[in-house]
Each structure stands twice: as C-alpha cells, then as structure tokens.
Amino acid sequence: MQAILMDMKSGQLALHDTPVPELRAAGILITTAFSAISAGTELQLVETGKKSLLGKALARPDLVKQVIDYARKNGLASAYQKTKARLEYLTPLGYSCSGTVLAVGEEVDEFRVGDRVACAGAGYASHREINYVPRNLAVKVPEGVSMEAASIATIGAIAMQGVRQAQLAVGETVLVVGAGLVGILTIQIARAAGCRVIAVDKDPGRAAEAIAFGAHFAFPASDPNLAERVRECSRYGADAALVTASSDSSEPVELAAHLLRDRGRIVIVGTVGLGVSRAAMYHKELSLTLSRSYGPGRYDAEYEELGRDYPIGHVRWTERRNMEAFLDLVASGSMQIDRLIANRQPFLDGLRAFEELQNRRSYTVLLEYPGAALPVPATVVPHAIEPIPGDVRVACIGAGTFARSVLLPVLKGMRGVKLHSVATSSGATAVSAAKLFGFQTSQSPQDAIADPGAPLVLILSRNDSHARYILSGLAHHKALFVEKPLAVSREDLRAVVRAYDEQSATGHRPFVMVGFNRRFAPATVAVAELFAGRREPLVLHVRVNAGFLPGEHWTQQSLQGGRVVGEFCHFLDWARSLTGCPIRAIHATATPDCGRYHWDNFAVTASFEDGSIANFLYLANGDKSVAKEYYEVFCGGSVARMTDFRDLELTRDGKTRRVNCRGDKGHAREMEFTFKALRAGAPAPIPFDQIVEITEATFCVRDSIQTGLPVKVSARPAADLSSDPASQAS
C-alpha cells in the first residue's frame, strides 16, 4: 500500500510502501478515492520541515524550551536521543479525503462495507491508498455529491465552525479576510445563512475571484480607501470579521479590527499572529474569538479516537455534524465548488502535485487514487517456545517516541538480536522505524504476530491495545515483551490470565515479560544489596513529581487506564521487587480534580505480607525544575536515598557512600535479562504472577481513590474476580 510521507528532518516528501492500517473496534478502513492537499496547513508543515535545525527551532520556540527543560532533568545525551527520535521520523500528510468503506470495526453500526464516506483527521484521512478512520471522523456522502466534492468536507467543516463561532444573524454584514480555500467556503456559507459578505485579500486577483464565488463585494487589502468602501457596502461597518488568512503577522487581525463597527466580533479561523493592538480593540470594545478547527470534539481523544459522541441536546454542532452540514449544503446546490476542485492529479504523481501547489495560484489539488484492496492474511502454523540458541529475531508492534528514543536504540546495539519486522496501527510510522533501526520489513500488527520468522514480539503500542496483542501472541505461541501495563481493565486482565493458564495447561510454556525496568536499574540493585539479609520490614517512601498532563493527552483517556494504571505501576513494582513479598492491601486518596488534574495528585500506602510499608506521593501539581523521582528506604539502622536513578546515597553506621548511577533506569539490563532467559529457555525475568499482582494492585489504587477505603490485593486474581470495588474493600 502506497502513502506519501514526509521526512521530519529534511522536509522531503516521498512515496513509501507501507502496511495496511490496523482495523480497530471504533472505526473503519476505507479505500481512498480522493484526498485534498491543503495549500495552507500542509505546505506550511513541509516548509518548516525543510528548514535547518536552527530554522525549526526559531519556528517552534515552545518545543525548544521543552528540550532544554528535559535536558536539565535527564542530561544532554538523553535529550539528544529523544530529539533525534522525533526528527528521524516519517509522518503522513493530509487530513481531508473521501473513499469507500472496506471494513467495519466491531463497535461500529452506522457504516456498511461499500458506503461512500468523507473523512477527517491528521493521521487518519491521509494521502494513502487505504486509511483507518475513527467513526466520529467519517460521515456518509449524500446522493448527488461527488467523491471529489466530498474530499474537501473537512475543510468545509473548518469554515462552518468559523461561521458558527461568529454567531451570525440574517441580514448582518460579514467581512472575510483571506480569500483562499477556507475563505471562499466561508463566503458561501455566510451568504447561504442570509448575510451580506465582503471579501478582502492581499492578492487583488484572489479578491476579484471572490465575487464569482458569492461575495457581494470584494476589495484588495491594499486599497487606500478600504474603510470607506466597507462602510458604504455595510452602512455601519461590518458586524463580524472572520479571519481566514494565513500569515505570521498580526496584520489580518489589525485590518479586521479597523473595518469592524463598534462592538463588532472577530473570529480567528486561519493561522495568524495575535498581536493586535489594545487601542484597536478597546475603543470599539471588540470581541475576539478563536475557532478550533472542525468543531467541538476536536482534540478530544474520547470523541475522536474512541467514538464517544456528544449528546445532540447538549452539543448540537460537533466536528462530525459540521461535516454533514457542509455536505448537505453541497447537495442542495448552495455551494459553488467545481472550480475549487478542478485541479486533480493521479496519486502516484502526488509529489509533483505538491510542487505545483507551491508554484501556482490553485486553491487546492485533489489526489485521485486508482483503488486498492486488502491483502489476504497468510496462514501461519503456531509453534511452541523452545530455547533460542544464537540470534533472536524480534517483531516490534508500536514505534512511538518511547520506542524510538529508548528501547529500539538498546536493541539495535545488542549482539545476537536481529530486528526482523516492525508494525504500527497506522502503518506509516512502521516505515520510519524500519528505515531508522534496520528492520528487515514493516508489517501490520497481526502479520507481525503471526510471522514465524520472529519468535519474540515486543508490544510497545498504546496501553489499550496491550491485552489484545497479548492474546493474539499467546495464541501463536510467541514469546512476548509488553511495555507496561499488562492490561487496563480487570476484564482484560482476566482474559490474559485465562489465556496464559490455558496455554500452560497444554504443556506449552508461555513467556510474558512486562517492561517494569526500574527493578533492573543499577541503583535499585545497589539498594537491594544494602538491605540484603535484613531481619525486619522495610519502610519505603517514593515521591514522583510526574508533572501536569492536559486532559486531551492520550494517557488521560479512560480506556488507556489513566496515569495510575499506565505509569504508577512502575513504582509499585519497584517497591515489590525490594520487599520480595506480595502486596497485602492498598489505601489511596487523591486531591479534588479541580477540573484540571484528573485525580493525578494522590497518595498511596501499600502494606506487604512481611510487614513492610511503602508510602507513595504521585504529583501533577509540581514544578518541572524539581527532580521527578525521589526514593528513600529505611531498615535496620540503614538508609538509602536516591534521586532520578542518578544520585544514590547509602548510609550505614554513620558513613555515607555516594554513587553516581548516571540516570540509568534499567532498560538495557531489563532487555539483557529477557534475551538471556529466551536463549536458555528459562521463564521471564519477572514471574508472571508478580506482573498480574502489580496490575491488579493498580486497579486497587483506583478503587481506593473512588471509595475512600482500603482495598485488599489478590496476588493472582481468579478468572471470575468481581470488578466491584466494594466487594474488595477491607
């Protein structure tokens, strides 16, 4: 399957052969018919990509600050590796396309194979032959609307949302600043809403063309009598201005403020500078509103990725409903778009289409696809896990920032490890990883699991996919390394435990390892040696200055398990490895959410069967300049103190030994132990029962926060374990 991908480091575009995207439960696969190249957003991204490293830094000072903060806490080498992983990356382009439904996810009931659909979303509605699109980012194409017209529905929804933000009324005068594609669509929507429309553009030719597309009046921005002309056309000055221009300066906003009437309204739709002068806004008491892309739901992962729609009684116009409304206007004949979509190029000539769009005054270019079909999955005979002498071939699922900056560099440098295949849900990132780390091939996730050439599968994908891939891997009798967590719900955990036990009952020896790397860190080993042979319980204190994550971050999604399940598991496992005995009970409490923290500020007390106690503080309300992780262990007159796995102090009999552990969190040693076990045919370095115990303990933390009660921890939950927190309260 072909896709147009951009090299983030050089800005170069190329056609790449990529795996077919994975069909997920809340979405559909489509055979792409047309995709629209955005003359604004996409060309700006390409131009930024072509800049030098200094140029990129000047364009995104916010990201530079993040890199500097990261370097201060984790060192220059780690910051360099993370930045390199982000730049040496191929990314898909495009966010508006049309196509035909090829396959439907199990949670989707509104689409059928063969339906004509318009699709939205960066990373979903891309320039590639087959796309995976979540259900809320796809709409059916009405009868009478061509697939060419449907391919710009996303851009139409952007214009639609801008008009809604302006709260226009019939008879008002609307000023549209910027007569590009979004501007022309905005003009036609505002006119259909019963408004008088005035178009302004810095290009006199574009301004003149706006009349043909429905503007009542149009003027070049350079007209010295522009303010008088606008007043003549509107009697009092424009009631509202929609700024659809694209500019680094704030001139379009200043112009809008100058042309509006007293107490007029400005809506920012395009990417422009916001440095409008106070005087321009103050003396007319103007209001300034930003329009966020396609509409409500944008950047909400629960809506976009998981398909959770907003009730129409509470949110009438979502991004999906804006797309539907735009297509309804097209179907009614209210939109003149034939000239807008007249420039079409074959998809395989897509690179030339980008060049033409940069050099010509076209509103957009549509890429036309020849059609594609899903490959037939290969039939694979499962095999049992045996000791693996010599080189171990690895299939990797997932190639996000953590994989590219931490684990894959470790594997690439290990002797006796062969990177066989890489797979991602989108397919595009797999090509990046294959190129960067030397994988032999890129595949779909299920193909990678089924491939008999790789006995070990690394599952480095998003949290909610872990259990699904584990079950598939166990069915194919593969050795599995899973980046934490093992599962995000008790239902998933029971399914994994059941599959593991069923395979064990057949005489096969399952190999499931989870990436609890901190127990393998050199600092942890040194602490364990200090307290070796102890005769009394440990008392542990762990403070995690985790930092704030906004609600739209993917880890905050409920189906990802949140930060308790997704990250706090690390610290429970660290304490579990030091005590060497099961967790008996959990008691947790959290500060109020405050509409900001998603219960990410919490305290946990864990008691262990030998009487040891661990106290944890996990915090999202601290300052990033303070160390992220701080550990203390007390026992038998000795104390261990550690900061970020870098600075370690071991105190006994009044003497303190200081060790610089260089921030090594144990990733390399974790992988070394994993491959050593595989070659010997030995069990995974962390016993499966402990992995299950830690996973269940994170669920108990969540339960205790909700109920305010201590919760007993089952060391190995039974298959029918109740999911009711109250049933476990002690």
Image (tube, grey):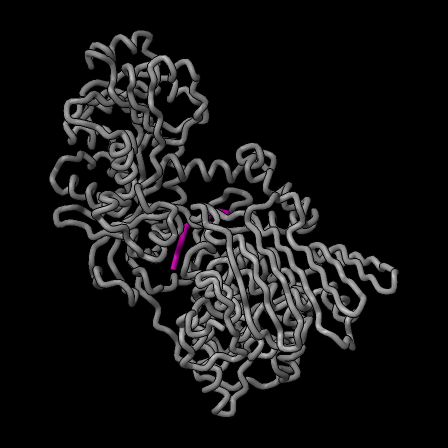
Query: Residue 48 location, x and y as percent?
Result: 50, 37
Query: Residue 695 location, x and y as percent?
Result: 52, 70
Image side of residue 225 versus residue 439, left or right: left
- Residue 424 visible in the picture: no
Residue at point 32%, 61% (across, down): 26
Q: Is residue 664 above or below residue 156?
A: below
Q: Nearer the viewer, residue 408 or 590?
A: 590
- Residue 350 visible in the picture: yes
Image side of residue 420 versus residue 91, left or right: right
Q: Is residue 55 above or below residue 225?
A: below
Q: Nearer the viewer, residue 320 or 277?
A: 277
Q: Nearer the viewer, residue 234 or 602?
A: 602
Q: Nearer the viewer, residue 506 or 245?
A: 506
Q: Is residue 76 above or below residue 683?
A: above
Image side of residue 360 versus residue 320, left or right: right
Q: Is residue 631 magenta?
A: no
Q: Quadrant of the N terminus?
A: bottom left
- How many labels, in total? 0
Query: Residue 36 location, x and y as percent?
Result: 31, 43
Residue at point 31%, 43% (across, down): 296
Q: Is residue 700 above or below residue 169?
A: below
Magenta range is: 1-7
Residue at point 61%, 82% (across, down): 683
Image side of residue 157 versus residue 461, left or right: left
Query: Residue 427 location, x and y as percent?
Result: 43, 59
Q: Magenta stretch: dominant SS?
A: strand
Q: Quadrant of residue 579?
A: bottom right
